Image: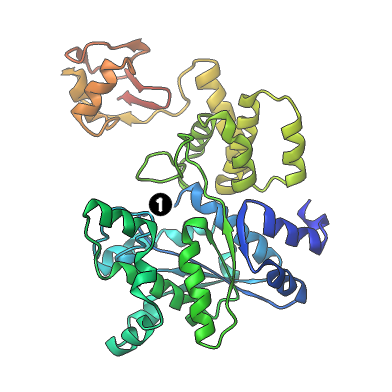
């Protein structure tokens, strides 16, 4: 359906779908209509080894621009990632080892390649310039900004009120992110709204370096599976790029109903016209979530895996059958306390977690609920352990 869109329709989609704000929209429309190949920057600091679907709101936007013929520059902040962006962080950021950051970045490109065509993508690392920058060059760069403007940001003001220290390196972060745009000669940057301050600083700095200030597309932030806060690994409300199809399907089916169409718009490639038609139909939310889950899984694992995940979900949750593929754990035939057994099967991270789950009635052995955490279990082969609706293990 994308192939049938006119150029104007494609531009309209780029500037509206999942977008919170566009900086200098008229100028950007003119550039997108000019036929010029724009340099489109997006930067990410490696902080964990996995990406989650919250990032895909930006990457799907980059994909649209790439399909329109523009040059995507995927910048890995292997230098800035050593101390990280202080945006929305109430605790001071600590300096991290360069090797640790590089190791975290290794898996990023593999995951981003599920959306972007990496053969057509310019991959850059900001250690290319910061690793060579002299102290006097850094000081000269910093002189383009004022301390007052940097410290007026919400998270720094909150720290001041709470008596929490701010490291001298932290207000420098927007300076470095801004200079990335100068070095890459960015015409346009795509980011989440949480990065808008930093990218506006970049626009100002580019103009001081006699470059046209970059336009900015700021996408909406994706709410996590809890329906309350933005998607984040640290909050546990995320769906990972590398989660298995079954995990992705199950997590999507668990989201609050009010997030369904927001997810359709932000993290699928279903055309907006079709999403509009779905909104008008009085469809059972479970059926909508099932469609949503398949659309998402298609992007990361392919259509066949999406169909298989739907069948598996229906088998376990609708028909109350055991999963087709249960991880097997070899354990000697003996009697073990239920907490020790759960720990051995790696279904839990600690005995405290195991006890809490038992007391909540979330633990089953061979489909029978275990209510007493002091229960002894015979670990004979073939026994199936279950926690909640999605965690299983079989003794072999």
Decide if residue 8 is in sight here. yes
Can you say whether 48 is above or below 376 in the image? below
Q: Of residues 351 and 213, which is closer to you in this image?
A: 213
Image quarter (top left, top right, bottom left or bottom right) of the C terminus: top left
Q: Of residues 100 and 365, which is closer to you in this image?
A: 100
Q: Residue at x 33, y 54 (%)?
A: 89
Q: Residue at x 46, y 36 (%)?
A: 228
Q: Residue at x 70, y 25 (%)?
A: 283
Residue 348 x, y percent position in the rendering:
27, 31
Total labels: the figure holds 1
Can you say whether 58 is above or below 326 in the image? below
Can you say whether 131 is above or below 166 in the image? below
Residue position for label 1 = 50
Residue 202 x, y percent position in the rendering:
49, 74
Can you say whether 197 is above or below 141 in the image? above
Circle 1: element type = loop
* Residue 386 sits in quarter: top left
Residue 359 x, y percent position in the rendering:
26, 16
Q: Of residues 175 and 11, which is closer to you in this image?
A: 175
Residue 371 x, y percent position in the rendering:
26, 11
């Amino acid at each position: 359906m994308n192939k049938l869109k006119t150029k104007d329709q494609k531009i309209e989609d780029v500037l509206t779908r999942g977008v919170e704000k566009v900086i200098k929209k008229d100028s950007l429309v003119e550039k997108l209509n000019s036929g010029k190949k724009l340099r489109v920057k997006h930067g990410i600091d490696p902080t964990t080894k996995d990406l989650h679907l919250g990032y895909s709101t930006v990457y799907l936007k980059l994909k649209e621009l790439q399909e329109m013929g523009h040059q995507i520059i995927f910048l890995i902040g292997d230098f800035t990632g050593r101390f990280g962006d202080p945006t929305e962080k109430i605790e001071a950021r600590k300096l991290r080892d360069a090797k640790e950051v590089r190791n975290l970045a290794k898996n990023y490109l593999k995951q981003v390649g599920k959306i972007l065509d990496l053969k057509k993508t310019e991959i850059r690392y900001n250690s290319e310039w910061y690793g060579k920058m002299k102290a006097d060059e850094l000081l000269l760069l910093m002189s383009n900004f004022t301390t007052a403007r940097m410290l007026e940001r919400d998270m720094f003001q909150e720290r001041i009120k709470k008596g929490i220290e701010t490291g001298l390196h932290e207000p420098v972060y927007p300076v470095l992110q801004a200079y990335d745009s100068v070095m890459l000669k960015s015409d346009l940057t795509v980011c989440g709204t949480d990065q808008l301050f930093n990218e506006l600083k970049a626009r100002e700095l580019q103009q001081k370096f006699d470059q046209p200030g970059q336009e900015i597309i700021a996408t909406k932030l994706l709410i996590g599976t809890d329906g309350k806060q933005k998607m984040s690994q640290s909050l546990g409300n995320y769906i990972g790029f590398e989660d298995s199809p079954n995990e992705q399907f199950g997590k999507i089916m668990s989201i609050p109903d009010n997030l369904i169409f927001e997810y359709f718009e932000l993290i699928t490639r279903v055309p907006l016209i079709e999403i509009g038609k779905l909104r008008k139909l009085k469809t059972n939310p479970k059926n909508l979530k099932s469609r949503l889950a398949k659309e998402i899984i298609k992007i990361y694992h392919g259509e066949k895996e999406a169909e298989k995940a739907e069948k598996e979900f229906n088998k376990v949750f609708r028909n109350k059958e055991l999963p087709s593929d249960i991880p097997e754990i070899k354990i000697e035939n003996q009697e073990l306390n239920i907490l020790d057994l759960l720990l051995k099967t790696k279904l839990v991270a600690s005995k405290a977690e195991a006890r809490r789950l038992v007391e909540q009635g979330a633990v089953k052995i061979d489909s029978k609920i275990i209510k007493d955490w002091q229960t002894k279990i015979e670990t004979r082969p073939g026994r199936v352990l279950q926690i909640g609706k999605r965690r299983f293990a079989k003794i072999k």
